[in-house]
Amino acid sequence: MREDRGGGAMVMERRNGLNRKRFGAYLQSDPAIYTGDDNDCSPRQSNASAATSPVNHYDKSPASGDASPYLMSPWNQSASPYSKSPWIVRSGMNLYDDEFYAQNGLIGSLVREEGHVYSLAVAGDLLYTGSDSKNIRVWKNLKEFTGFKSNSGLVKSIILCGDKIFTGHQDGKIRIWKVSSKNPKSHSRIGSLPTLKEFVKSSMNPRNYVKVRRNRNVLRIKHFDAISSMSLNEELGLLYSGSWDKTMKVWRIADSKCLESITAHDDAVNAVASGLESLVFTGSADGTVKLWRRELQGKGTKHFLVQVLLKQENAITALAVNRSSAILYCGSSDGVVNYWESEKHLSHGGILRGHKLAVLCLATAGNLVFSGSADKNICVWRREENSGSHTCLSVLTGHSGPVKCLAVKEDEDESPSPPEEESNVKKLYGSYSNRRWIVYSGSLDRSVKVWRVSENAPELLKLRDADRPYLSKK
């Protein structure tokens, strides 16, 4: 394990085995996760000045070093010791200029008094949000664009596929919606998974039922508990759904047919992730991460268990796949992120430690990975292309409740950086990338915050080292 006492740097280590107390609260119904008072959940108006929360929300711990990492965060303008230092001499990178913060930090907040935000999905300039109010809201340019409502069940997952929207609900149903070709504000429900036709046909055969509890049988093709996660393999035209009923189901998008129902775990399936060729990953409250492979069998296909990647006491709470780098990230209830790298086969790469409480969601974009947590913060990690190591660039603060979901898209308003900045960044990091990302974070504080993050943002440790000579001058 590496730990920098002087700068409060995040720590990353190779896994030698975890032995932590089980985070039982996250195995219960989601609304019980957030236990703050009503004042902590009060809605906020869209205002960029709400970008940072007071640094006294961070409690020091032995694992965090002598100083809070949030004090060093480039996004935390109000709390930065550099912004108030009378001795500061600006460096060549102009890290603390208004222009730097205009390109990195909070853009705004979306607030509607109708419940905790559980799911997000973004496509182009549209953002879809799901909450426990049963509503799916659609936002455009930080303003509400339209919305539609389901009959029952809070919205725990949203998948966008062309003009179709798939929503997974607490009541175990997957609903399908379609956007009107004439009016983009109009959404109509066109069906559900499984379809009514398939449901009736399957119910006629007694062999299609499975026993789930004493004196209760259910159809194999239908989830009978909350939908916790969904993942789309657009190339294969398959939708994967994970549920608290311990199963993963495979759906063919073209005809909404259930191709497989797999009893994947001994406890609730909390996360499903696809995207690495024919591989699918599942994470469960039983503490395991499993790797499944899709293979041809007869006229169809079937998924086979290939490997148990991780087995621990703490529940697995989130999974994300970086397709371009072929990396799997896994968040768990003890606040750590494990990752596996794929060359010829998957191998454990290490552990990212940046949270005090459970990791509830993960998202990847370019060389960045974002982890949202019950500690109300979002850690931004960058993977170095040459070494494969990860460094914490920043901690995004501002939510007053657990961060439940994340969505990322590339910033379409990118502007070229000055040659001087590119040269200075290359001196510090050895490489340069002008890519910027728009990050959406949904929270149990009933808000969605919108951030802009650059892959060039200075990491905490190097930010401190770069400015130490200037801060010592008098």
Image (spheres, grey):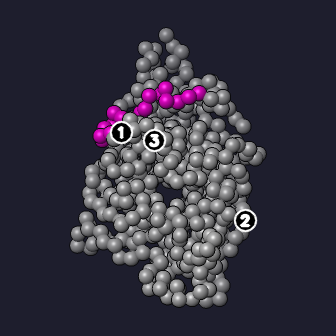
Question: Residue 237 location in percent, x, y?
Answer: 49, 76
Q: Which of marks 3 and 1 is nearer the N terminus?
A: 1
Dot 3 surroundings within 10 Å: few (below 14), some, or many (20 or more)? many
Residue 389 located left or right of residue 133: right
Residue 58 visible in the picture: yes
Dot 1 surroundings within 10 Å: few (below 14), some, or many (20 or more)? few
Res. 390 image quadrant: top right
Q: Distance between the residues labelled 1 and 2?
A: 45 Å
Question: Residue 212 location in percent, x, y?
Answer: 62, 71
The kind of residue tagged 1 is: Ser
Q: Main secondary structure of the magenta part?
A: loop
Which of the numbered marks, if any, corresponds to residue 42?
1
Q: Distance between the residues labelled 3 and 1?
A: 10 Å
Dot 2 surroundings within 10 Å: few (below 14), some, or many (20 or more)? few
The kind of residue tagged 3 is: Gly
Q: Which of marks 3 and 2 is nearer the N terminus?
A: 2
Question: Residue 338 location in percent, x, y?
Answer: 65, 50
- The kind of secondary structure element at disc 3 is loop
Query: Label 2: which residue?
Result: 307
Question: Residue 27 location in percent, x, y?
Answer: 59, 53
Q: In the rendered view of the protein, which quadrant contains the N terminus?
A: top right
Q: Nearer the viewer, residue 357 or 416?
A: 357
Which residue is outermost to the left?
182
